[in-house]
């Protein structure tokens, strides 16, 4: 462990905004609820001090179990000000899952809003909980951490570059969440790349669309706070008139999953020139379709649209592609915007099916300064990390090809399924189905059928007769890849991070419209084959 270093911590990005403009708003929750840099700073120092006093020392890890409210945002800062790692968790996750994560992360204290407090108690863990939204009497009665006069730390704690700044949880193939620790050094390298690429300033306003447990939220917060600008969490009602929300708040920077584009389109907000105030628009978390990027570009006019990619294990994002209506479609595979070139200081290699390095394409592996030191549970890393050329590499599970000096996304390794001996790319089926007249979007999943698998396509848009769908797809797909069923939905289900929930669609595919169960236990061996998200980021 190295010694603490001044300015090494992620929270120093907030302190930069504080020095530049202490009375400017850092967080805008609504017209009647705004917090300046000075106010958030003072709150975070008090809460951090209360936790240090209660424990008698600096905590190593502090969970933040709160919605996108003052407690959530100030709680993240307070955890960092303690010198602890922030462990943000979704307040509406099941209590059993929350308990599993708190234990796995070895959390020593929790900052929670009232809903988060209930969840912690239901999880059955006896941890110190600071719940600032409860009155003093209620806090005392519940045995919670209370703020006392003189609690405030004089200044944020110093940290070392290799100290853990965040612990984030990502879904695992076993169904057990995997804890991913990320160091201050990981973030220092990442934000150095960001600062060199973008011209964010105090006049910008950042929309914040994802939950605090999603690593993309770190981009919003610390890009905004590093520039002395304001974070504007986007309420669900804003999507009813997103152009109006963007104009009212003066939003200039947008970052969301691509699924948000379809939502804005459905509510009539994605018309040409509807959001000219957006200088920068970023998309990550799942595959960005060329058609969606083109529509968003027309809505923002001269604003820049970029596709970002990166697994949680590699600190937010590792590559970027700037959308161009002239050149990007020609570089795309299966209608998906390329994921671009890697950040400076990172290296990549592609592995073929035999695990050998390939120049033609294969699984993307990345090494460099943004790589996590390893999962909380070392067993989770089996098969994900390897050492070559004196470097540690992470296997992303995403298949890519090189095109014009960048990477184009092909699909997840586990989104390639085998149907009666034929290898089928689900992304290819998605892309073909989207070209059917009347279809707005389409997602293909596989389900068990006799001794093999069969495909089900879920789609949005106008109703399309199955026979018409098949006539359209036959010239585009090999016979074995033709779907056996087509189901129209008003909209795709989204998970808590506003990504298309492919697991939910795969589960729906196991139940016939007449209610008959097609799950593996009743339909023979096999599995849906498309339960994982696609891609991890991008």
Image: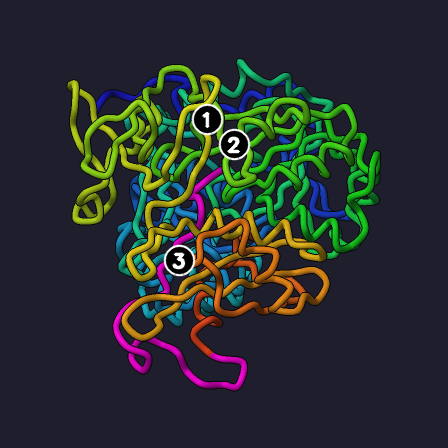
Label 1 SS: strand
The residue range painted magenta reads 512-538
Q: Which mark is residue 308?
A: 2
In the image, taking residue 338 as reference, residue 419 lies left or right, namely left
The x, y position of residue 204, in whole percent, is 71, 26
Residue 506 colored in magenta in the image: no
Query: Neighbour class for label 1 at 10 Å: few (<14), some, many (≥20)?
Result: many
Q: Which mark is residue 143?
A: none
Asked whether disc 1 touches disc 2, contact meaning CB atoms under 8 Å apart, the reply is yes
Q: Secondary structure at mark 3?
A: loop
Would you say the magenta stretch is mainly helix, strand or loop? loop
Question: For the residues carrying marks 2 and 3, which lies nearer the camera in this image?
Answer: 3
- CA separation, marks 2 and 3? 22 Å
Left or right: 211 as drawn, with respect to 278: left
Image coords of residue 289 (percent x, y): 59, 41
In the picture of the structure, the residue carrying the numbered disc 1 is 319
Q: Mark 2 or mark 1, which is nearer the start of the sequence?
A: 2
Alpha carbon separation for disc pair 3 and 1 = 24 Å
- First in sequence, mark 2 or 3: give its number: 2
């Amino acid at each position: 462990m190295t010694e603490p270093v001044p300015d090494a911590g992620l929270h120093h990005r907030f302190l930069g905004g504080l020095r530049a403009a202490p009375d400017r708003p850092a967080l805008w929750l609504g017209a009647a609820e705004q917090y300046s840099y000075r106010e958030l700073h003072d709150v975070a120092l008090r809460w951090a001090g209360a936790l240090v006093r209660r424990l008698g020392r600096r905590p190593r890890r502090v969970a933040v179990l709160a919605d996108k409210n003052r407690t959530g945002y100030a709680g993240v800062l307070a955890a960092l000000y303690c010198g602890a790692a922030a462990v943000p968790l979704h307040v509406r996750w099941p209590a059993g899952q929350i308990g599993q994560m708190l234990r796995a992360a070895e959390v020593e204290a929790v900052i929670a809003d009232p809903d988060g407090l209930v969840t912690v108690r239901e999880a059955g863990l006896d941890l110190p909980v600071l719940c600032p939204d409860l009155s003093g009497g209620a806090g005392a009665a519940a045995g919670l951490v209370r703020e006392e006069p003189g609690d405030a730390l004089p200044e944020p704690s110093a940290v070392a570059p290799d100290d853990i700044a965040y612990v984030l949880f990502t879904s695992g193939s076993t169904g057990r969440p995997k804890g991913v620790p990320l160091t201050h050094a990981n973030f220092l390298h990442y934000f150095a790349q960001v600062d060199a690429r973008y011209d964010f300033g105090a006049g910008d306003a950042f929309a914040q669309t994802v939950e605090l447990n999603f690593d993309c939220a770190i981009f919003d917060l610390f890009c905004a706070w590093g520039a002395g600008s304001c974070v504007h969490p986007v309420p669900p009602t804003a999507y009813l008139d997103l152009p109006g929300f963007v104009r009212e708040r003066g939003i200039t920077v947008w970052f969301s999953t691509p699924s948000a584009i379809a939502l804005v389109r459905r509510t009539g907000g994605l018309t040409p020139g509807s959001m000219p105030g957006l200088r920068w628009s970023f998309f990550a978390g799942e595959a960005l379709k060329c058609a969606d990027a083109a529509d968003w570009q027309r809505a923002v006019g001269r604003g820049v649209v970029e596709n970002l990619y990166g697994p949680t294990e590699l600190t937010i994002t590792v590559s970027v592609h700037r959308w161009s209506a002239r050149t990007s479609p020609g570089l795309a595979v299966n209608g998906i915007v390329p994921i671009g070139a890697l950040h400076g200081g990172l290296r990549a290699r592609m592995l073929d099916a035999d695990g050998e390095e390939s120049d033609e394409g294969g699984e993307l592996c990345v090494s460099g300064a943004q790589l996590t030191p390893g999962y909380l549970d070392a067993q989770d890393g089996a098969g994900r990390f390897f050492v070559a050329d004196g470097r540690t590499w992470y296997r992303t599970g995403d298949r890519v090809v090189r095109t014009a000096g960048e990477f184009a996304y092909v699909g997840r390794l586990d989104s390639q399924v085998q149907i009666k001996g034929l290898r089928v790319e689900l992304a290819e089926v998605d892309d073909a189905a989207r070209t059917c007249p009347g279809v707005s979007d389409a997602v293909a999943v596989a389900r068990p059928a006799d001794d093999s698998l069969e495909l089900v396509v879920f789609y949005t848009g106008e109703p399309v007769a199955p026979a018409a769908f098949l006539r359209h797809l036959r010239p585009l797909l090999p016979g074995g890849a033709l779907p056996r069923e087509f189901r129209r939905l008003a909209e795709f289900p989204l998970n808590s991070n506003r990504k298309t929930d492919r697991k939910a669609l795969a589960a729906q595919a196991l139940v016939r419209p007449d209610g008959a169960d097609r799950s593996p236990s009743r339909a023979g061996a096999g599995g849906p084959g498309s339960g994982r998200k696609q891609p991890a980021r991008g």
